[in-house]
Each structure stands twice: as structure tokens, then as C-alpha cells.
Amino acid sequence: MTIQKEVDRRKTFAIISHPDAGKTTLTEKLLLFGGAIRLAGTVKGRKAQKYAVSDWMEIEKQRGISVTSSVLNFDYDGYRINILDTPGHQDFSEDTYRTLTAADSAVMLIDGAKGVEKQTKKLFHVCRMRGIPIFTFVNKLDSQCRNPLELMDEIEETLGIRSYPMNWPIGVDGDFRGVYDRREAKIELFEGGRHGQSITVSEAGDVNDERFRQLLGEHLYNRLCEDISLLDIAGDEFNIDKVIAGELTPVFFGSAMTNFGVRPFLEAFLALAPSPGGKSHSEGSVEPFDNDFSGFVFKIQANMDPAHRDRMAFIRICSGKFEKGMEVVQARTKKNIRLAQSQQFMARERVTVEEAYAGDIIGVFDPGIFNIGDTLCGGDKVFNFEGIPMFPAEHFAEVMAKDSSKRKQLLKGIKQISEEGAIQVFKRPDTGLELLTVGVAGVLQFEVLEYRMKNEYNVEIEIRKLPFEMARWTDTEKFTKDMLGYSDAMLLEDQYQRPVILFKNQWTLNSFQEKHKNITFFEIAPLV
């Protein structure tokens, strides 16, 4: 098969949502339909005593939330599918931001009872900034759910994107009977079946089939016909160009937990979602079907396999063909690197990869040489894709080992976890003792840090929280402690020995800026 044909069958997408909207559950049901798993574990293991396949870290299983992005690969109906399952909790949004740089489209999951929630808005706007198509799945229609027309209005008003319902729910408020497929003009009736774990057999047919009037009852059947008529007259027309441009979101209704509407969603999504496209870089651009390999590192994860304590760099392939053991140039260092031990993933389960194409996500063994944002080039031309910014931390603490004899393990663990992008590490430039200050986007990350240091590095740590809310980089490398004067700010250094100033709030930052108008402050660290 040619590179062009391989690229055309790739679909790489991220799933975004507010916590508890059912994102990891939907991911597992897609894997179920793809034949990647035979039994789907519900996230918190309530009715079905299984853990989510896409949650690999022990703390994820204990807390019932995703705290890192999972990368999952499977084949379905001739397509090669790469799913990026991201954390929904806002405390881990930075991992999600980075992951979205590797996606060609996004599936936005919305809780049918709650509508568009805070974190969904935040992640939606990141997708808009990237200009990727967004497909919407309104979940949990088998439980109490808001009026679907109200939900459509909220999506359009809150997010500022037009919507087109691809299917329409039949019965709501806990009496969900199935969906009407607008494109196929047919009704599909569903049964829950083993708490949604095994593939559900559906009954499908034309809306005019007299059986459906009898099965649904006169009231539900007439209401469905009225809704369809209203949508056809007053709703937006479907336009694939607007979908690809991110101006129109196709909306699907269903229930991930009980498999209502999941397979029709998957099949319609695969038919509509874009395959990998071109990508700009410092010297021009690449096309996915170019012969020369190129890709970038968007994620680094240590200790995915506790038995080996290894570290993986996740690479999104942007062009050409990857072959196991191939040599590439790391653009940042201009060094040749051999990409050995290449793998693809089902959470913690790994499969050795001999070859992969643009759109695929692969993991390679990282002996400590990769950084997030690194560009890898396989041809004669060396260039850089746009870097991945480090988002500003909002919570800070001093971190130390409870047992001072374990300082070496402490430094190793903090270094590795910071290289994953999970935390930001700063040091005081004016102290002989290397006192570590850690910054995180959300307070729950301190809990994860404490857990990982204990379980992965055998170090119990003490976390002393600091009263600062924001960090700022400056355009001068010669910033000194004396320049702080009597302010409440704290001067630190980042990993590149650049000055970083911590401020307690916006007011102290503003007053400091007033005194130092000749200095520019940056909220996001300048790319190295």
C-alpha cells in the first residue's frame, strides 16, 4: 500500500470533556466496537468490576479519573484509528493542551443533563485556536436529560459554533428509546445489554415502517416526526467544508454507558473526519504523503512499566513513513538519533511497531534525550515545527524529602516528572542548598506528585505551599534580587537558569510593573 493510501485511512483525534461527562467510558466503547477489547471496564467500577482500559496509572484506577493522556490504537472497517484520551479535570488541562497539538480533530463530549460545562468551554477554545474540526457527542441520554433543542441552543450560544444534529433522540427524561438517523432516514432502537459492556444488537429500519409507530407509541412517534420536520425547516444545512473549517459541529446523541448510538457515531465520524493534513514549519511546510519522515514529541511519560522503570517519548508522525531503527536528526541539537524500541499502545499494553505513517502516534524509548516539542527529521532538510508552549503554573510549593538521605532519588524523580511537563521546577539563585520550588496548574497535581514520588521513586516528600498565584519570565537575564525591593515577590530560576518572578496576585504584579516599565514580563515561558 502506498504512503498516500496509508495516510488516507488514518484518523487521529482527541476526546475532550468536563470531568464525569463519560469520556473514558466512550473511549472504551469505541475500542469495544473496534474489537480492541472484548469487555469494557467502567471508569469507577461501580456496576461492572473492571477498571478503564485507557487509565493505566494506579492512582487513576483508585480515583476513577484520568490524570494523564492515554494513546490508544486500533483498526476498524479499514481505518487505522488513533485515539488520544485526555484528562477532563482542569487540574490536568496542560496535558490536554499538549495532546491537542497531535490531533487532527476532536470529539467534544457533553453531559446531556448538565450541558456545556466550564472545562468543556476551555478545551473547546483551544480546539478553535488550532482550527481543528469538532464533533459533538451528547452523552447520558438514558438518564435524566435536558431537552435536545435546548442543548443545541446552548452549544451554539455558549461556544459560538453552529451545529447540525446527525441523529435525534427518541424519548428523553429517563425514557430514551433510541435515535433517528437523519442522513439514513431510519430509526435505531436499542437495549442496554449487560450494563453496556458487550456490543448491543440494534433494530434498524425506515421511519415510515409501521412497526415503529407501534413500538414507540403514538405520542413518541408523532413527537419525533414533528422534531424532524422542525429541524429540516429551521435548522442549519449540513456542510462538510464548514465542518472541516471548525465552523459547524455535527452533533450525535447517545449513551456511552449503555451503547446507545455509539456505533453509528463511530461510523459517521470516520466517514467525515479529516485524515492527516499538511503542517507548517520554520522552513516551509510538509505534506503527510511526502517521502521524508518528520514528527514531533508532544508527550513524555516515565515509569509506564513499573517493572522496567523506563521512559517513553510519544511522537506524532507528520510526514512520510517510520521504520523501526531508522535514524533521524533531532532539530534542537542537530544530532543523529536512532529510533529503536518503537511501540504503540493500549494504555499500559504495548505492541512493537515495525512501521507507521503520518497521523500515527508512536512511542520510542527515551534515555533522557528528548524534550516536549522536539522536531525529528528523517530527510536531508532539518527544520522545526512550532514549539509547544509551557502553560503558566498557578500553584507553588517548596518540595523536600522527609528522609534527607533520599535526596538523590528526590532530584531524579522531580527531574523526570518535570520533563514530562507535569510540573515546573524552579530553584532559588541565592541559596547554597538546592531548594526546589514546584509549580503546577492545579492543586490536584501536588497529590499526584506525592503519590508518584512515593510509588515510583520510593521517596516520601513534604510539600510546603507558597502564597503565590503567578509566575512571570522577563526579557532581561540580569534580573537581581535587589530589583525586587520590598515587594512580596520571590525571585527564582527555571531549568535554563532564566529569572522567574513569583507574584502573590495581579495587584502585586501590576504595582511591580509600574516600577519597572523598562522590563517586559511574559506569562508563558519563551520557547528555547
Image (cartoon, rainbow, N blue to C red):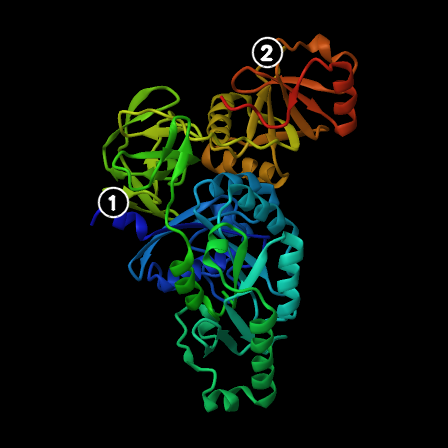
Residue depicted at 52% across the width and 89% down the height: 213
167 vs 385, left or right, is right
Q: Is residue 152 visible?
A: yes
- Vertical relation: 194 (above or below) 89: below
- Vertical relation: 524 (above or below) 350: above
Foreground pick, 424 / 56: 424
The total of numbered circles placed on residues is 2
The numbered disc on residue 436 is none
Give the mark nearer the N terminus: 1 vs 2. Answer: 1
Residue labelled with disc 1: 3
> Whole-Å distance between the Cαs marked 1 and 2?
47 Å
108 vs 296, left or right, is right
348 vs 99, left or right, is left
- Which secondary structure, mark 2? loop
- Which secondary structure, mark 1? helix
Q: Position of residue 299 (x, y in %)?
A: 44, 36
The image quarter containing residue 435 is top right
Label 1 sits on what residue type?
Answer: Ile
- Classify 10 Å Cα crowding around label 1: few (below 14), some (14-19), many (20 and above): some
- Classify 10 Å Cα crowding around label 2: few (below 14), some (14-19), many (20 and above): few
Residue labelled with disc 2: 477
Foreground label between 1 and 2: 1
Q: Is residue 145 visible?
A: no
Q: Are marks 1 and 2 in contact (CB under 8 Å)?
A: no
Residue depicted at 47% across the width and 45% down the height: 69
Q: Position of residue 290 (x, y in %)?
A: 28, 38
Q: Position of residue 140 (x, y in %)?
A: 56, 66
Label 2 sits on what residue type?
Answer: Glu
Q: Position of residue 32 (x, y in %)?
A: 38, 63
